[in-house]
Image: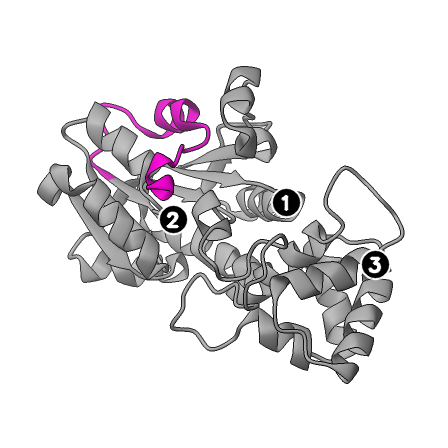
Amino acid sequence: MEELRHVPVLVEEVVSTLVSEKTEIFVDATLGLGGHSEEILKRYEWVRVIGVDVDEEEIKIANERLKQFGKRLTIVKGNYRDLDKIIMGLGLGFVDAVLFDLGISSYHLNSKRGFSFLEDEFLDMRMDKSQRLTAYDVVNKYPFKRLKEIIRTYGEEREAFRLADAIVRRRKLKEIKTAKELAEIVGKAKKRRTRLHPATLTFQAIRIEVNREIDNLKEGLKKATDVLRKGGRIGVISFHSIEDRVVKEFVKKEGSLIPITKKPIIPSKEEILKNPRSRSAKLRVAEKV
């Protein structure tokens, strides 16, 4: 299966900065298909991993992929914004390390949920399919002002006014149902061209809004700090500047954390060649004092 060939990004850097001989409980707060967890479970026989994710489909794949590790792995369907409740619910006090691998995976892009602007799929974009809000709702029901602000803030899109206006004009004539339709509308309206697909930043913005990614990240970082023992570490892999700024500012303002990485760790040229998706990844690590 395609999804089982998943390659985790910055895996060596994650292992070297977050895991040691003192690590007993490692929390993979964004389990996904289990790439990072698998490497840690393979290399450190004494480590127990708690894997958390909101996506039921990914959890099923990770469960099958990692079943060989038995009781050393516990998988919980949940959102990392509730990390304190999840850890308490497992009867644990504190943990030794927490990893966040943010954004969407190649699996999501192939999941037929409208994440990809290349596919003629319903505008869903939910990672947690039990939630109500979809990308269809954002695109077809949000007022112009709010839609513009989302595209500008979460997409850092310079042409937010123009693109939001094009979306609103089109939906007055006919509702926008699919990712491909939305991509075509944005592509025609956008004037400034870069190496990115014209719809990339707009899709990013809508996805972040649907999944409350920035709000969840801020809350998740706080909860992770609360459950971390002294000397424990938090690692965050981000894929765009909005996430990276949130992490950097949180560590700076959180009195109980000190940065281990003054500058973010980025992938080597060799990793980027093997896994092009890793090219925009940045890893920041902080330790609780």
Disc number for residue 211: none
Q: The residue tagged with tag 3: helix, strand or loop? A: helix
Q: Residues within 10 Å of mark 3 (few under 14, many from 20)?
A: few
Which quarter of the figure has residue 11?
top left
Q: The residue tagged with tag 1: helix, strand or loop? A: helix
Q: Residue at x 40, y 48 (%)?
A: 225
Disc number for residue 188: 3
Closer to the chain start, of discs 2 and 3, is 2
The residue identified by callout 1 is 245
User: Which amino acid lies under the numbered mark 1 shown in the image of this protein?
Assistant: Arg
Closer to the chain start, of discs 3 and 1, is 3
What span is colored magenta in the figure?
A: 1-25
Is residue 252 depicted above or below 140 in this figure? above
Does 265 lie within the magenta span?
Answer: no
Give the number of the mark in front: 2 or 3. Answer: 3
Q: Is residue 229 left or right of residue 123?
A: left
